[in-house]
Amino acid sequence: HPEQNQIIIEFESAVKVAERLYNDQAKNYTIYPKCVPSSYNGECHVNHIRKMQAAFSWDWGPALPAAGLHSTPKLIAINGAKMLDTSTDIELLNSTHWRVTSSVHIENTASSTSASLRVAVIDQDKEPYEIISKIDVIDLKTSPKTFIKTIVLDIPIDKVRKWWPNGYGNQALYNQTVSFKVGDNPAETHSRMIGFRKVELVQEPLSKGLSFYFRVNDVPIFAKGTNMIPISLLSNVNRKVTSAAKMREHLVKYMYETHMNMVRVWGGGIYEIDEFYEAADRLGIMVWQDFMFACAMYPTTPEFLESVREEVRYQVWRLKSHSSVVLWAGNNENEAALYGNWYGTGKQQVYKDDYIKLYVDLIKNEVQKIDKTRPYLVSSPTNGDYSEKNGYVLTNPYSNLYGDIHYYNYVANGWNANTYKRARFSSEYGFQSLPSYKSLQSFTRYPEQDLVMGSDFMKHRQHLPAGDILMKNQIKQNLNIPNTDNPTKDFQNYIYLSQIHQAVAVQVQTESYRQARSTINEVGEGNTMGALYWQLNDVWAAPTWSSIDYEERWKMLHYYAESFFAPVIVSPRVNLDELKIFVISDLMVDLQQCQVEVNVWHLQTRRKFTKIVDVTAV
């Protein structure tokens, strides 16, 4: 009867639900911040619901707090037993074997007596052949209604090739096939591509502080890359002729083409769709995976924690099969917010207790139970192991001697390398610019009125407090801003100059981090091993930090990235009356008998000074 088989899903306003939960929580104590800054033109209390945090507005995007399902649900009928999902762990067992542990989630009605489960690893590089396989028989009558079945395969290391990050080697992938057969029914088959690699986050004592770098297959990796935000504030919305999946694949390809090897999936957005991680697997882009908590305190009610527990279990199970995923991180900037009293939490112990309860007692514990092959950081930025040994919230997470930092400076000259810190790892930094004129044209019917300096249209899209003033002052430190009688031409010139400033500033900052890779100064700063600029992409056409605008047009910055992230660069640094030339190589082999030609021009006399320097090895 139709009346007995109904599934009803009711949607409520995300804004109203968040407000109701805030009011309930406030009867006990307030969870800060209450609202986003007024310049964001956004909504309030997003930290009380498990929706995309940036959907209530951010400094790079509008408020679009959607209600509904994140993706299309499926109604699955089961007769006998069914394989619902699979997950894979790969670890280097010893110096001779890789261990592949396949976990299979099975739903069982016990109406059948037995089933067979077969796991195979297939090399498809040239002529496909099966490297190893194993089959188990399952007694369904004695099995519970839902259970996880595991099959372990130990593969000699000489039977498979290693997976490497982009620039360090090939991305060897193998087809793992899981087949589940119940009685005389056709077998169900799940296939995925897997890679063999060992990843470590190395935090070892230095003269002062600790190191902080990724080591893959026993090779230290300088992480070069960016931070990715969602492609849209409305889940999986397609762009004109580009599907949501293809858009992700394009972004991964654009990272690959500019010598990047890491992307941070930022904690105020979403856990990306499968196609994104599959593309990262194929192209060697390591993924720093945040959990979705950003720039806020969060409640720790039993209902909230249970929701987070299910979220973490699901996402770690789903993503841990990907060789590209190399790190889990608990949140974005919440340790810094608590330590720095960003939101008026002061010294109240309840907020410190909540922090540890959520990110340590719950998330860290769940991650380490499900995935024993990857490191976990509680926050970003953080002091890493040093923070953990000091109660997680008691040390300044912006220290240059530990962990990672986020560093933005919109006042000092962005083209001066001495502006920037010598940190162990910089996982956020950047400057704003405007998108192309064509991209902005797509969002207005009145370009002559809207696409001019100081228009209401442009002011509405600038969410960084005093952002327009800061951008203009940054540009004026190094470039002349022309002023004509043509407002449209002036605006187009300003777009161009903003992109020049951004590209050069991020180049200087990035190269300053690469210059510090192999040295430590007198106060212990240096040995920098990562540079991830903010940000890769956009959710609308506006002044933002992106290197690729909303319509997939590369800004000048992304073209520059191909140069400053190149495997071998020659990078200058001026300090008072001293010019240093750095030759920096990420190659796995030494460069022998090199020469560097240095040319210096006097701008007034146009005289050129040239010197050729022999470099014995790099």
Image: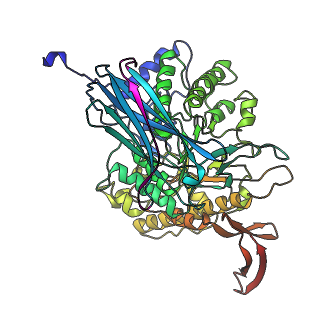
Q: Is residue 128 magenta?
A: yes
Q: Report whether 45 appears left or right of 388.
A: left
Residue 582 in sight? yes
In the displayed structure, would residue 605 be above or below residue 372? Answer: below
Q: Residue at x 26, y 29 (%)?
A: 75
- Image quadrant holding the C terminus, namely bottom right
- Observer-nearest of 306 and 22: 306
Percent of width and height locating residue 240: 29, 54
- Extent of the magenta region: 126-145
Colour scheme used in the picture?
A: rainbow
Q: Is residue 607 magenta?
A: no
- Observer-nearest of 338 and 358: 358
* Among the 4 quarters of the image, the one containing residue 94: top right
Q: Report whether 393 appears left or right of 548.
A: right
Percent of width and height locating residue 272: 44, 43
Percent of width and height locating residue 271: 46, 39
Q: Report whether 454 appears left or right of 449.
A: right
Q: Report whether 451 appears left or right of 583.
A: left
The total of numbered circles placed on residues is 0
Q: Residue at x 67, y 44 (%)?
A: 201
- Observer-nearest of 443 and 454: 443
- Image quadrant holding the N terminus, namely top left
Percent of width and height locating residue 145: 37, 19
Q: Residue at x 63, y 41 (%)?
A: 93
In the displayed structure, would residue 511 be above or below residue 599? Answer: above
Q: Residue furthest top?
A: 27
Residue 46 in sight? no
In the displayed structure, would residue 19 be above or below residue 606? Answer: above
* Among the 4 quarters of the image, the one containing residue 119: top left
